[in-house]
Structures are given as structure tokens and as C-alpha cells.
Image (cartoon, helix red, strand yellow):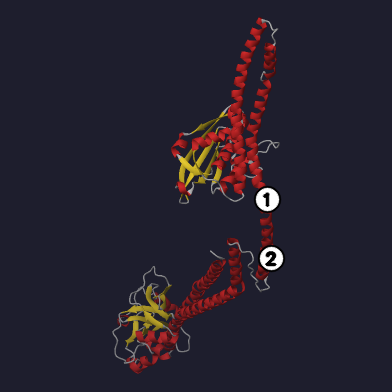
Amino acid sequence: MNIRVKVISLLALLFAALIGIDIGVQRQILLPSFAELERDDAKVSMKRIEYALDLSLDTLALAAADWGNWEDAYRYVQAPNREFVRANLTPSALKQLQVNALIIVDLKGDFVLSSAETLPTGAPLDLDFVARKALPADFPWRRNLASGKSARGLIRTNQGIMMIAAAPVLNGSGAGAPLGFVIMGQLLDRAHLRARGAHAQAALSMLPEPPSEAAATESVTETDRVTRIERSFRDVYGKPLLTLRVDVPRRITAQGRTAVTYASAYLVGAAVAALLALLIVLNRVVLGPLARVTRHAVAVGEGSDLSARLNLGSRDEIGRLAQEFDGMVARVEQSRHQLVDQSFHAGFAELAKGVLHNLGNAMTPLAVRVSKLDDRLRAAPVDDLIRAAAELEDSHTQSERSRDLKTFMHLGSREMSGCIQESRHDLEVIRRQATLVQSALSELMQSTRNEHVIETVRLPELVSQSLEIVPDACKQRLVVDADDSLRRVGAVCVARTVLRLVLQNLIINAADAVRDAGRERGTLRVGAEIVRENERRQLHLHCADNGVGIARSDLERVFDKGYSTKSKDTNYGIGLHWCANAIAALGGRIWAASEGPGLGASLHLIVPLAARDT
């Protein structure tokens, strides 16, 4: 993922998070606040209804008190007469009072006067509360008769809920002992409820079923359209009587939801516009130049042309980075030219060093052979034979002495014959080793032209030829076990001279590993197989010894130039490095494996087979 995608993704996530937070705040804080306003408004509406109901009861109580403190009513309770009834208890009088029922009760609770009419027609009203002859025995206001204490409340009748108010009957001046009660009642019908609802500016209704004892005094219910407040009221007995319900349309929430939706849409649009503008600016100022620098760096890294320059004209940090990169590439180009010139000469020196190392390996057994040949020739009894031959030619030599000399001559001749035979063998070995030196020198000349002689060779013979140029001390310390896989592979076309020198180095290193392990004699097992890599058949040689082994941390370093665990007074550390370079020059690779110190090691090399062998 490039930096442009990362920046766009990060900014998009940031804006999305901010939008999500804003929408969450609107929905979790603003919208609930609108709902809270509606609940408060509904509660206020219910308070208005209660106030209107109280106001109606107060008006009713005021009318009852006015009638109760009337001298004519006072005398009527003392001496009931029809004239009072005919003159005052008319339909127009009740209509003017806006009451459905008028009752005068004496101190015993008996009805002295009772009337019930329908408003506004004035028609007689069948009202069970008025049809009684006296207040019910359990009526709670009976205790107020003697004390003259006013009362008001609600009762259930056969015509519905009725508001009633009672005031004491006094002598007209508000004094004297009360003679009873004036009770006025007004039905709480739909018209009255509509009037109270209009007064409170709320949709008021009365539930048909009476509330239960366990019902709450007030409850709030919210739907998608209305906020509903239900308030229960009790009658004069203290029992639940009715429930009034106020429905407040949720216009505030609807408007708030609409406002939040528009605000969210505007916010999303503004965020998208801001994001696009920010991305355009970032792309022009930062991302575009940075992408240009990146593409140039990748092109320089993947290609070989170091002459290309960015020439970015901006003066900001990216422009400064581009200038520094151009300067760095210019310095790398200059260093590359110098390195090529130096490596041209160093390559010859490195190649010569490796060849000299191989020549040193080849010259060591050659010198040993020459030294043994010199010692053998020096030890030959040539001078003794010459003196014996001269003495035999002397005629004065006695016969017994002559026999001894002849015996000596015979034995010396046999010794000289054996010496000559061994010397011929040594000379043959010296000749072959000298031929190897010539081949190595020839290989050096061919390597300067990057050419290798490809020959058809059988691997068991290649191992035998490599053993011929290994010092005798190494061969005495190491048994080379040629695996049968060498024979099964058959003839292969490879650079025989190079592989022979590589095997010579591997055999010498294996012998030294056996010596370093403290063993008098060790084993090197050589095997081979044909593998296919990169669509080509390749030869895989593996040499496993039971020597000192290689630490895991050194497996990659054993092929480094100059790296060696041997003493510093030798030229070891060159052989494996030369082997790695030689195998790489053939298009192959070499690696080491070991289970650890003391567990032996194995060296593997893979070289491509020549095209004519595939």
C-alpha cells in the first residue's frame, strides 16, 4: 500500500469518525433533548388540565357558598316551602349557575331540596345521586355537616363523573350555626372536557375504564406521533375514579429530527467537499511530488542509468529531498565509475590469488614428490657400486673378495632397479602434477575471457583425478568414499578443470576438519544427483565429512574472503572463497550445512550442465 492510499484512507477514516461522532451526538443528545422538551410540554399541559379542573371545582364551590350564605335558603331549611322552590329552583337558575344538580341537606344528611337538569336544555335529568333521599351513610362529607366545613370532589353517577362542591347553610351574613349543606354538581362530560382541553391547549380525553388501585398517579408514554400523559384522580371516598389523558403531538421531535437530518446531510456534504479539497491540495503539494521522487528512486534502483535527474523545482522539504537525492545519485555514479575501474584491475588480482592458491595446493605434493625423489636418489648406492666395479676390474683381486664384490654388485643392482622403478612412478606423478599446473595457468588465461572448457567426464574419475593433486598427508588422514550415486549419474558435461580444483579444496578442508576434531583418520563421503532448477538440468555434488563441524552462525561466513577458523600463518580462508567465486562463475551456487560443532559438515554445490548434455 503506497503512501497516497494510506493518506486517503487515514483522512477518510478521520472524517468518517468525526461525522459518526457528530451524528451520534445529534441522535444521542439533541434528539433526546427534543423528546425531553415534549415530555415537559405534555406535563405542563396536564398541569393546566388539573388547574382547569381545580378552577371548575372552585367555581362550583363559590356558587355553592353563595347559595349557602343566602338568608332565604337559611329560612327554607328551617321551614321548607313551595314558594322558595318555585321562585328559585327554575331551569334558568340552574342554567345560569351552570350546574346539573342542586341539593340542600340538613344536619341529619337528609335531602331538604334536590333537583337535577340537563344543560343547556333544562330537561329533567335522571341522576341517581340526586334521586336519593339522603346522603349515603358512608359519605365522607357527613362529618362536615356539624362543623360547616366546605368540601369539593368527584363522584361517579349513573350519568358519568360529576364534580360536586358543598358549602354550609348560613344566615346570610356568614354567621350563626350551620343548618346543613348546599351541594352543587356538574357532570364532567365530553363538552366540558373539550372546553378544559381547549383552555389548556391540549388534546384531552377520559379513559372509559377506571384505573386500578395499583395504577400510578401519572405516567408518560411516547409513540412515534404523540407524547401521552395519563393522570388518575380519586373520588370523595379516596378511591381511583377516572384517568385523564393528554396527547401532545411530537412536532418538536419531528422538526428536530428533520433539522438533524438536514444538518447531518450538510455535514456529510461539507466533509466530503473538504476531504476532496484537502486531497487535491495534498496531492499537488505533497503526494504528487513524493510519488515522483519514489518513482525516480525505484527507476534508479532497478536500472543502471545513473545519469537521470529529478530537477524538482519546489523549495519545500520534498524539493530539498529531491535535490539531495540527485546529488547522492551523482556521487554514486562517480563512485561507480571509479569502482568499475578499480574492480577491473582487482578482478585480475583476485583471480590470480585464487589460481595461485590452487597452484600452491598443486605445488605442495609436487614439492613433496621431488623431495622424496631427491632423498631416494641420494640414498642410492651408486658410489659404492662404482668402487665395487673398479675393484673387480683389478686383476689382483682375490677370488673370495671377487665373489663378495659380485654379490654386492648383484644386490646393489637390484636396489638400483627398485629405486629406478619408484623414481619413474614419482616422475609420472610429477609429470601429471606439472600438467595440472599448466592446466591451471591455461584456465587463468581462459577466465580472463570468461570462457571455461566444457568436457565430458565421469564423476568417479573426476574424484580420482582430484585425489591425485591432494597432499599425501591429507590422503593419509582421510578416506574418500565415492558413493554409488556418482556412477549412476553417468557422464556429464562440465568444466572439469574447475570442478577438479574445487573438489581438491573440499578434500583438503575435510582432512583439516578431521585433524581439528582430534581424529587420526576420518571419512569424506561424496555423492551426486541430477536436479532440475530454473528449467535446466543441473549437477548437485555433496561432500559430507565427520570432522569438527561448523557452528550455525558460521555457515554463511565460511565462503567470505579471508574468513577461516585455522591459524593465521596459513593461506586458508582463500580456498572456499575461491570455490564460491568459481562455482558462481559457472552459473551455480555452493552452500554449507552442519548440525553443529563436533557433528561433521557437508558442502553442497550445484552447477548447470552444458547445453549439449541436456
Question: 132 and 411: which one is in front?
Answer: 411
Mark 2, residue position: 327
Height in image: 548 above or below 164?
above
In depth, the one of 299 and 166 nearer the eye is 299
**What residue does disc 1 label?**
346
Residue 396: % across, % down: 70, 7
- Image quarter of residue 114: bottom left
* SS for dot 2: helix
Query: What's the CA distance linking mark 1 and mark 2?
Result: 28 Å
Q: Nearer the viewer, residue 43 or 521?
A: 521
Amino acid beneath label 2: Gly
Pointer 1 or 2: first along the chain: 2
Whether residue 47 is visible, yes or no, is no
Q: Nearer the viewer, residue 62 or 202?
A: 202
Left or right side of 74 for 590: right
The 10 Å Cα crowd at callout 1, few under 14, some 14 to 19, many 20 or more, is few
As displayed, is residue 247 above or below residue 91? above
Q: Is residue 118 visible?
A: yes
Q: Position of residue 318 (x, y in %)?
A: 65, 69
In the rendered image of this protein, does residue 467 appear above or below residue 19?
above
Residue at screen point 35% across, 74% down = 210
Q: Are marks 1 and 2 in contact (CB under 8 Å)?
A: no
Q: Amino acid at mark 1?
A: Ala
Q: Residues within 10 Å of mark 2 (few under 14, many from 20)?
A: few
Q: Report the residue at 37% width, 76% height from top.
A: 242
